[in-house]
Amino acid sequence: MNILILGSGGREHALAWAIRQNPKCDRLFVAPGNAGIEGVARCVALDILSGPDVIAFCEETAVDLVVIGPEAPLAAGVADALRAAGILVFGPSAAAAQLEASKAFTKQICDACGAPTAAWARFDQAGPARDYIREKGAPIVIKADGLAAGKGVTVAMTEAEAIAAVDDAFGGAFGEAGAEVVIEEFMAGEEASFFILSDGVDCLPIGTAQDHKRVGDGDTGPNTGGMGAYSPAPVLTQALQDQVMDRIVRPTIAEMARRGMPFQGVLYAGLMIRDGQARLVEYNVRFGDPECQVLMMRLGAQALDLILACAEGRLSDVQVNWADDHALTVVLAADGYPGTYMKGSAIKGLDGLPDDSSEAVFHAGTALRDGQVVAVGGRVLAATGRGASLREARDRAYALVGRIDWPQGFCRKDIGWRAL
Ligand code: AMP
Ligand code: GLY
């Protein structure tokens, strides 16, 4: 079959890398892709937020399945457009994507289905929001309701910080996304991510992971999109996964179906775990980046069978062939990230690096200029290793990092510390 993946990050390179290994995959396209993706697929220039453009490409090139990587095309309704055109698609409708695109929507779903999460209230004006903060006290969490590129959340340790965050949101710091604010109880505990495929009815867990959001070693410095990740997450024991499926995931999927907006795609549950109990922090309606890199390294070629079963509504027919393995990925970012960073620096040492079922370097913000790979984004590469233990996976990933010659880049040296 011919497959089109939408997106251009490390997540999409990992998806393409795994899908390519499956003999069912004939032609593989990625739009818009990056320099690394060129090695496993054909990169095509397409406006991935435009349903008509994506449909036209699918019709011209006989694409059988579209896999949507990032949230923006999902929230823009590209999956709806493809389904309406009779094209098989992996990814939720715009209505179901509200589970990521609106914090208040997710909270309402949790309340309706009894899924444990932080106590919350929503505000569309600063005055009542400030009063609520003074009543509840700190620590407290302030969230812009809409999509804010990961920047809309403030975990406020003082009332003053919380009030400043409310004033920022209503002052327009997040544009439309901040026109409404959700204020939440602060939850203490250990965070972990859980990935579940759903075809709207059935659910299939496909792995757990933990990421490292802060830019600096020891979890210091500003938040980023993620500086590294590993899978599995030891804190998410089988018993906890069963608890999350019973109390959070299945009730959510049932509630979405009941509302006439069945969720079809990958549900990424961000969880807070404390004293053997998990509560929902948030949902995303796509794979995490860089969590996808470790999941794809572990799933390999079967990823396509699972994605296809999900898109075709026959998840109850498939199962995951688990290996007793671990994967870890280290993100290399451009100096200055997550602040301003330089573009255009050359990356050497990529040729001849191992690329097999236990090690690979996935590209994110890279492009080819005159035959040379150059950095064009903040997060640029994800060096990924797999092994029988997390330590082995980590050693493989850092061995790859050691062979990359990019003086203008940096990475964290302690990915996996919590689990190791
Ligand atoms: P979100 O975008 O909702 O995942 O929030 C980003 C990050 O803020 C999460 O990964 C948590 O680290 C933190 N966070 C969000 N909500 C809460 C909460 N209610 N209590 C504690 N930390 C939170
Ligand atoms: N790594 C976090 C995310 O993809 O949202």
Image: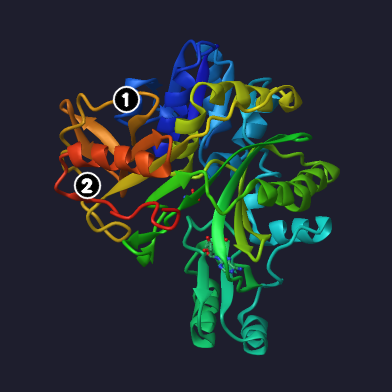
**Label 2 secondary element:** loop
Most foreground residue, 199 or 323: 323
Here the colouring is rainbow
- Using the rendered image of the protein, determine whether residue 47 is visible from the camera's viewpoint: no
**As displayed, is residue 51 above or below residue 104?**
above
Question: What residue is pinned by disc 1?
Answer: 355
Most foreground residue, 313 or 170: 313
Whole-percent x and y of residue 60? 51, 13
Whole-percent x and y of residue 318? 69, 23
Residue type of the residue flagged with mark 1: Asp
Quadrant where the N terminus lies? top right
Question: What residue is pinned by disc 2?
Answer: 343
Q: In the displayed structure, does residue 270 sit left or right of residue 348? A: right
Q: In the displayed structure, does residue 412 sit left or right of residue 235? A: left
Residue type of the residue flagged with mark 2: Lys
Most foreground residue, 207 or 124: 207
